[in-house]
Amino acid sequence: MPVADWEKVGIGAAIAASLGAVVVFVADPARPVNARLELIQTQMKALPKAGPIAAGATLSDVSLLAQQPIFVMSTGANAYKEKTVKLIGISISPGRKAALVSVDGQPAVWMGIGETQDELVLIEVGSNAVRFDTPVGARTISINEPAAGGAG
């Protein structure tokens, strides 16, 4: 048999075994019908109940959430403005990798991997460049690059 046929046989056997387990669990022929139904009802009662969105939330709070966009806007009057980032220095030691960065002309700060500064999350530090996760995607900044906004 070709490999693709063996894969189909394996997938079919896995599905059959899963369905068999469900049938035995839910429809165990050795149990009376009422006992099976009670088991299902007990399990359904144990499921978590849907609660309010937040304690003290009102309908107007929910409507405010619905008005905000789910995705970052990249065009228009309310578009996300990319941060201006200047990479000043890099520190790589056995226990920590960090970058000295200035965001939007603010004083430079040291950022370790995973730390956040003005919606920028440092995700990688190399020997001459760093990589940030931004609201509009990943961005790489070189140590010799002039301070500028924009995706990279």
Image (cartoon, helix red, strand yellow):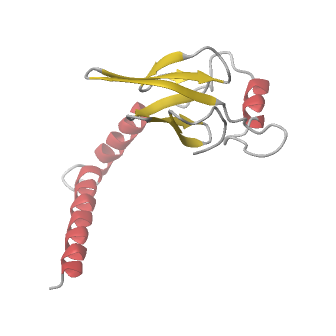
Residue 79 showing in the rendered view:
yes
Residue 117 appears left or right of 60: left
Answer with the quarter of the image where residue 82 lies: top right
**Above or below 48: residue 79:** below
Answer with the quarter of the image where residue 78 lies: top right
Which quadrant holds the N terminus? bottom left
- Residue 40 x/y as whole percent: 36, 43
- Picture residue at 72% right of the left edge, 37% below the top: 80
- Picture residue at 23% right of the left edge, 55% below the top: 21
Judging depth in this view, the residue of 31 and 114 nearest the camera is 114
Residue located farthest toward the bottom when viewing the structure as drawn: 1
Which quadrant holds the C terminus? top right
**Above or below 47: residue 29:** below
Answer with the quarter of the image where residue 84 lies: top right
- Residue 72 x/y as whole percent: 68, 40
Judging depth in this view, the residue of 119 and 82 nearest the camera is 82
Residue 152 appears left or right of 125: right
Judging depth in this view, the residue of 47 and 54 nearest the camera is 54
Residue 47 showing in the rendered view:
no
- Picture residue at 59% right of the left edge, 28% below the top: 86
